[in-house]
Image (spheres, rainbow, N blue to C red):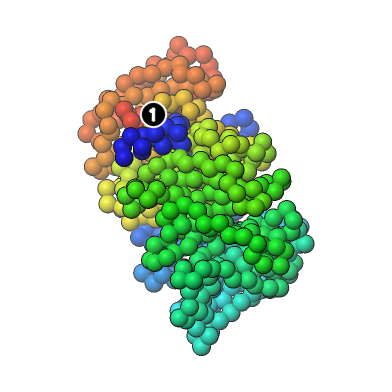
């Protein structure tokens, strides 16, 4: 088992890993990179970011927060951020009294060709359920909504919507799950017109199974493809891929992956091939050990290639995008840590960046990844801290803007460690900055926190080359160093503080 795990890690996660730090901002090549956390007041409550979209003067983050502690009264919220990641404002969607509202599971919000965005929102209170569509402008304000489906307690029907996407006719296609009392849960496909009104629905499923569609896309011939999970009992047994015609009639269904996860995504390429992002478990593995899996299919549902990667406990696939050169950018959870990974056009790993908090025991989950207009990447999700983490009980929304190599800190690919933490940057002090002779560095670790092995500080130049490295002294929970920089040419440098295994914190330093 260990050898198999090592082979999978080498194959799918051969990479220097990503640093994400609280309120950490850099300016590189006239573009900002940053990581910010939102909903910090949500200590002990749910806080999740589901989609991020770039607008003309910044970004919109669509997520959910628990409105009242301990009530599970979730509300959908839209955050507006400036181009440098500063919070501008937030809008919470109004829902009927007592109802909870959800956008969906993985990147549920779609951009509209005519401007703005659309989201399907599930609202429920017990058996009183409805599906709504909300439209938003570039300010993140709701500019209209309509009801798609509604069921009362007397109907004994439940419905959830997980994703919505635009269609070529100006309308939309959405997917999710549908269930009735004493019947198997089925996947549901909903076709909406340009106004968001329902045109038709179709359901799909097998006898004695519980199906849930998670991702949907329009096929090149005007039909649709959807992917999701099938449950034979309480846990998912497999993933599925379904192709339909233009009116939703099923043409074929392919079940794949043992013990498939509850997340996943699907994309259609211009040549009519289909790509799915999911996870996989071999029958001989332990119950919760999985690999991530990228699969390319032809129009008849035959596998063209399939790559497995990142073998570990609780590997979960979330979102991915097809890039202009036909390569892929993906996000996932790997060993309870976030993973941003670049794959080539054949699905082979180019690099990966992992995200976690210091002394991490909780979970870091990225639900959406997008290509930014400057060639970098946008990544959003949630971070859950637990016992042993710096802020036990804290659950926050986070947004990262990286460069084209997945770095928030320039040069992260040259740091030379195998793990990076995301929450110590706020504790780092660097002075003076700008500097001429000596730079003093102090990092106060959280109570009970400890570094592993020797700690050191590295300076990289603007090209990512190592120009200076020195050891760091540790006194109790404080790391200190005084670095002589007078011999360095004037310019901008990037400071990286690391221990024997992890990147701890970093800063831009100007030498005069």
Residue at image position (67%, 59%) is 224
Residue at image position (51%, 34%) is 349
Residue 30: x %, y % from top left: 63, 32
Q: Judging from the image, what secondary structure is the residue with disc 1 in?
A: loop
* Front-most of residues 246 and 21: 246
Image: 309 above or below 66: above
Q: Residues within 10 Å of mark 1 (few under 14, many from 20)?
A: some
**Quadrant location of the N terminus in the rendered image:** top left
Residue 327: x %, y % from top left: 61, 38
Image: 304 above or below 10: below
- Marks counted in the figure total 1
Q: Toward which corner of the image does residue 133 lie, by quadrant?
A: bottom right
Q: Toward which corner of the image does residue 231 lie, by quadrant?
A: bottom left
* Front-most of residues 431 and 148: 148
Residue 73: x %, y % from top left: 44, 71
- Residue to which mark 1 is pinned: 417
Residue at image position (64%, 75%) is 147
Residue 179: x %, y % from top left: 51, 75
Q: Is residue 135 left or right of residue 233?
A: right
Q: Toward which corner of the image does residue 193 lie, by quadrant?
A: bottom right
Q: In this view, does 11 lie to the left or right of 246?
A: left
Residue 465 visible somewhere in the drawing: yes
Residue 316 visible somewhere in the drawing: no
């Amino acid at each position: 088992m260990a050898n198999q795990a090592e082979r999978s890690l080498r194959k799918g996660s051969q990479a220097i890993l990503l640093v994400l730090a609280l309120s950490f901002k850099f300016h590189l090549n006239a573009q900002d990179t940053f990581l910010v956390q939102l909903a910090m007041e949500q200590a002990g409550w749910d806080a999740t970011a589901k989609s991020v979209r770039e607008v003309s003067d910044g970004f919109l983050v669509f997520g959910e927060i628990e409105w009242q502690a301990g009530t599970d009264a979730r509300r959908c919220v839209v955050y507006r951020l400036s181009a440098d990641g500063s919070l501008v404002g937030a809008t919470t969607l109004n829902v009927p009294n007592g109802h909870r509202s959800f956008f969906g599971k993985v990147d549920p919000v779609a951009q509209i060709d005519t401007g703005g965005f659309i989201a399907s929102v599930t609202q429920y209170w017990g058996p009183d359920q409805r599906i709504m569509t909300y439209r938003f402008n570039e300010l993140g304000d709701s500019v209209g909504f309509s009801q798609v489906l509604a069921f009362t307690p007397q109907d004994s029907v439940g419905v959830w919507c997980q994703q919505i996407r635009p269609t070529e006719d100006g309308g939309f296609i959405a997917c999710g799950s549908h269930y009735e009392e004493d019947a198997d849960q089925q996947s549901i496909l909903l076709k909406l017109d340009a106004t968001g009104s329902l045109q038709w629905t179709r359901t799909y499923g097998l006898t004695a199974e519980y199906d849930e569609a998670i991702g949907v896309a329009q096929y090149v011939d005007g039909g649709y493809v959807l992917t999701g999970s099938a449950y034979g009992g309480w846990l998912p047994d497999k993933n599925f891929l379904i192709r339909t015609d233009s009116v939703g009639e099923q043409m074929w269904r392919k079940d794949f992956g043992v013990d498939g996860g509850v997340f996943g995504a699907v994309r259609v390429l211009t040549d009519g091939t289909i790509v799915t992002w999911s996870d996989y478990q071999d029958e001989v593995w332990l119950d919760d050990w999985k690999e991530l899996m990228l699969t390319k299919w032809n129009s008849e549902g035959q596998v063209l290639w399939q790559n497995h990667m990142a073998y570990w406990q609780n590997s979960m696939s979330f979102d991915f995008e097809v890039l202009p050169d036909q390569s892929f950018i993906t996000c996932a959870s790997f060993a309870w840590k976030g993973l941003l990974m670049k794959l080539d056009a054949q699905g082979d790993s180019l690099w990966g960046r992992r995200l976690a908090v210091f002394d991490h025991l909780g979970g870091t989950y990225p639900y959406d990844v997008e290509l930014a207009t400057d060639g970098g990447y946008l990544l959003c999700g949630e971070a859950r801290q637990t016992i042993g983490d710096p802020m036990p009980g804290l659950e926050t929304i986070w947004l990262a803007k990286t460069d084209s190599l997945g770095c928030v800190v320039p040069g992260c690919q040259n740091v030379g460690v195998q793990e990076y933490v995301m929450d110590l940057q706020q504790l780092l002090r660097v002075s003076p900055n700008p500097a001429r002779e000596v730079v003093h560095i102090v990092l106060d670790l959280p109570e009970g926190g400890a570094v592993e092995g020797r700690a050191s500080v590295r300076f990289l130049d603007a090209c990512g080359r190592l120009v200076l490295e020195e050891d760091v002294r540790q006194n109790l929970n404080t790391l200190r160093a005084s670095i002589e920089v007078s011999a360095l040419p004037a310019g901008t440098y990037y400071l990286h503080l690391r221990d024997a295994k992890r990147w701890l914190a970093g800063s831009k330093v100007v030498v005069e």
